[in-house]
Image: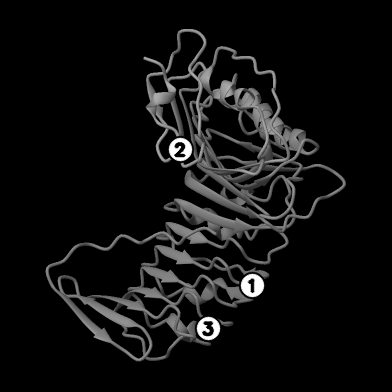
Amino acid sequence: MIKDKESPIRSCHFVYIVALVFGTIIQFSDESEFVVDMSKASLIHVPKDLPPKTKVLDLSQNNISELHLSDISFLSGLRVLRLSHNRIQGLDISIFKFNHDLEYLDLSHNQLQKISCHPITTTLKHLDLSFNDFDALPICKEFGNLTQLNFLGLSATKLQQLDLLPIAHLHLSCILLDLEDYMKENKKESLQILNTRKLHLVFHPNSFFSVQVNISVNSLGCLQLTNIKLNDYNCQVLLKFLSGLTGGPTLLNFTLNHMETTWKCLVKVFQFLWPKPVEYLNIYNLTIVESIDEEVFTYYKTTLKALKIEHITNKVFIFSQTALYTVFSEMNILMLTISDTRFIHMLCPQEPSTFKFLDFTQNRFTDRVFPN
C-alpha cells in the first residue's frame, strides 16, 4: 500500500480546534485556514455542512460512492482534497471547475472505472488515480495543461505505447504506476514515458512476476519496484523487463520493495545490475526461498557505490554459510548495509577491500566474527 503524503501546512501561532460528531475542524487563525478531517467516519456521501473557508478536506477511508458538483463547488479556496479508500466508481472532472486553488487531489484506492474529461485547474501539483479499476491509463488531453504537476498516480490493466502522449511535455517528479491487475497479453506491449525523475511500479503481491512490457523513460533518475515475486523460472522475465529501464546514464538509484526470490535469482539480479550505471541499490523486505547454493559471481568494474538490504527473512534453514556470505563480503563497492536480517555470521574479504562503510545493525552476530 502506498501511503498518502502529508500535505504541507504553514506553522502558526494559534490553533482553534472544534470537535464535531464526525471529524475535526482546525482553524489556523493567521490566514483563517480550515483543515477538516472526516476520515474513518463511515460517511456514505460528502457532508453538506462543510465550512466554506475549508482549505484542506480529508474524507479518506469512508464509504462515499459518488461525487457531485454541489458537494465541493462552494469550497472556492480548497487546496487539498483526500478521497482515497472510498467506493467511487465514476468521476466527472468538471466537478472541480470552481476549485481554482486545488493543488492536491487523491482518489487512490477507489473503484474508478472511467473518468469524464474536462478542463481542470492548472494549479494541481499532485494527482493520484492509482489503485483503481481502470482498463486503460486514465489520461485526459486536458492533463497536458497541468504545468505545475509534480506527482501523477495511475492504474491500468493494459498499456499502449502512446497512452501518456497528452502529458509528454510535462516534467514530473514522480509517476506511480499501479500494475497489480495488469493482464498479460500474447504480444509484448510498450509504454513510452518521456519525462519523470522517479518511476514507481507496483505489481500484484501474490503473483509471480510476469509483466512483459517494454517501458522506456527519458532522464530517469530513480526506479522503484514494489511486490516482486521470483523463482528460477521467471527470473529472466524480470531481467528482460529491467533491460529497457536500467540502461540510461541518469539512473542512479534503484529500489526493490517486498521482494521474494530464490538465492540463485537474487545473485542473477546483482550480476545484471553490476555493469549498469546504478550507484545506489536498496532492497527492503527481502524473502529468500527454496535453496541457497554456491553461485558464480563475477565482480566486474562497477559504478555501484552502495548496497542496502534491510529486513531479510530467510526461509532456507539448511545451507552453506560460505555460499551466502561470500557474495557480499567480496563486493567491490564502498558501502554495504545488511540490517535486521537475523544473520548469525559474516565473512571478511579474502583480499584488500574497497569497503569504507559497513552497517550490520540488528543482526545476531557481534564484531567478534571479524579477526583483529
Tell me if mark 1 has few (under 14), some (14-19) or many (20+) residues whose alpha carbon lies within 10 angstroms of its own. Answer: some
Q: Amino acid at mark 3?
A: His
Q: Nearer the viewer, mark 3 or mark 2?
A: 2
- Which labelled disc corresponds to residue 68? 3
Q: Is residue 139 left or right of residue 361?
A: right
The residue beneath circle 2 is 364
Query: Which one is nearer the viewer's eye here, 208 or 360?
Result: 360
Quadrant, the N terminus: bottom right
Q: CA distance from mark 2 to mark 1?
A: 45 Å
How far across and down, in percent of the image, does residue 22 sit? 38, 88
Which element carries disc 3, helix, strand or loop?
A: loop
Q: Amino acid at mark 2?
A: Arg
User: How many labels were placed on the picture?
Assistant: 3
Q: Nearer the viewer, residue 252 or 98?
A: 252
Q: Residue at x 60, y 19 (%)?
A: 275
| Marking on residue 111 | 1
Q: Nearer the viewer, mark 2 or mark 1?
A: 2
Q: Is residue 162 above or below residue 370?
A: below
In front: 338, or 86? Answer: 338
- How many residues crowd mark 2 within 10 Å: few (<14), some (14–19), many (20+)? few
- The location of residue 53, given as percent across then percent down, is 29, 80
